[in-house]
Structures are given as structure tokens and as C-alpha cells.
Image (cartoon, rainbow, N blue to C red):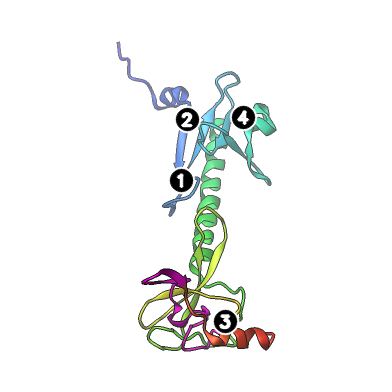
Amino acid sequence: MDSTLSAENQLDLAVEFRVPIPKTQGGRHREVVVRRDGDSGAWAVTDGALIGLQAWIDNEGWRPVWDIGRAAAFRHTREGALALALRVAEIEAADHQALLAVAAEPLDRGMPTGQRTITCPHCRAPGAERHGEPIRGTDDFADCARCRSCGRAWALDPGADVSCTTCGGSGTPGAGPAGRRTPDGWTPAPECGCREQHEESGC
């Protein structure tokens, strides 16, 4: 007796399918998981989480299953859920690439770099690139500059003149640390005079 299962019988045994998200190397979702409900036999498109499972709802995106209810989450046929999962994977991939692009592009916050040239306080080369440095543990960015010549990076200060060849927009000569070590311990680093001039001018 031949006990080999047909392809359809094998599919009938499946309770889960995993659809990889293309071009994704990090982030919350790396794959879209299609799951079958053990009671109803209906399928849902989920994020694969073990705790706090979310299901994809058209025109709404990811929604917690505990919030919408299992009936709203598990309402697809197997074929319908797989087709939706492929579409969701493409959407997630596009969102991931857009997030990477935002993180990589220079910020347009604070002082307009189009009006002033940022000068590197280390090598004195003009035209440093403004960029956002992700702040760990938050979804915010710190306003920074990176020299195209020597490659050094430093934080920008809204109260300093970005065109200054002494502080490069940091307000500290040489764009050094906030303090400096002396034989008597740490003392505040001297501030560049351009910061006071910049603040007095009201810019």
C-alpha cells in the first residue's frame, strides 16, 4: 500500500506558512506568518509574535488579535491568506526601505545648512555634511555634522555658528568634549565666542 501523501494532502496538514519579507535585514518583522485557527480552520495573516500577536487587517494594517478578536483575524481561506501575505510582505519591505532612507539622509532640522557652510573644526575644511545620529532607546535623532575631508563627526549646537572654523557649530573650540581633564580634575571646556555672538544676534 502506497502511503505517500499527495501535495494537496500535505498542504491540508500545514498549520503555518512563513513568507519572508524581501530586502529586510532588521526591524520588528522579518517574515509574515500565515496561521490556521485550530477550531474554525480559517486562516490569518500575522506578524508571528508568540506574545501580543498581531493580524493584518486591510485598510488598517497590523492590529492586536486581542483587540479585534479571533473571528476578525482568522477569516481567510488558505489561498486568500497566502495571497494577502505576499502583498503584506511587499508593503513591509517598502516601509523598511523608507525607514532606512530616512535614517541615512541628512536632517533638515535646526539651522538651515543651505544658508551657512559648516566648517570642520579639526581640519578646517568647509562643506561638512549635516546628518542625524539615531539616539539609542528613542525614535529621535541628534543633529550632527560629518566632515567630508577628514571623516570626523560632531554634534551641532543651535546656539553656535556653523560657519565658525573654531567650533564647527558645536560651540566648543575644536568640537571637543563638554569637559576637559586637568591636574585638579575635570573642568568645563571653554566655549567658542561665536556662540555668544550668535545668540546676541538673535539668529
Residue 173 magenta-drawn?
A: yes
Whole-percent x, y for residue 100 in the image: 49, 61
User: Is 24 or 6 nearer to us in this picture?
Assistant: 24
Q: CA distance from mark 3 to mark 1?
A: 42 Å
Q: Residue at x 48, y 83 (%)?
A: 167
Q: Are marks 1 and 2 in contact (CB under 8 Å)?
A: no
First in sequence: mark 1 or mark 2?
Answer: 2
Q: Looking at the image, is mark 4 or mark 1 nearer the viewer?
A: 1
First in sequence: mark 4 or mark 2?
Answer: 2
16 over 188 or under it: above or below: above
The span picked out in magenta is 161-187
Say which amino acid is labelled 1: Arg
First in sequence: mark 3 or mark 4?
Answer: 4
Say which amino acid is labelled 4: Phe
Query: Is disc 1 placed on a helix, strand or loop?
Result: loop
Report the predominant secondary structure element of the magenta stretch.
loop
Query: Is disc 4 placed on a helix, strand or loop?
Result: loop
Residue matched to label 3: 160
Say which amino acid is labelled 2: Glu
Residue matched to label 4: 74
Residue matched to label 1: 30
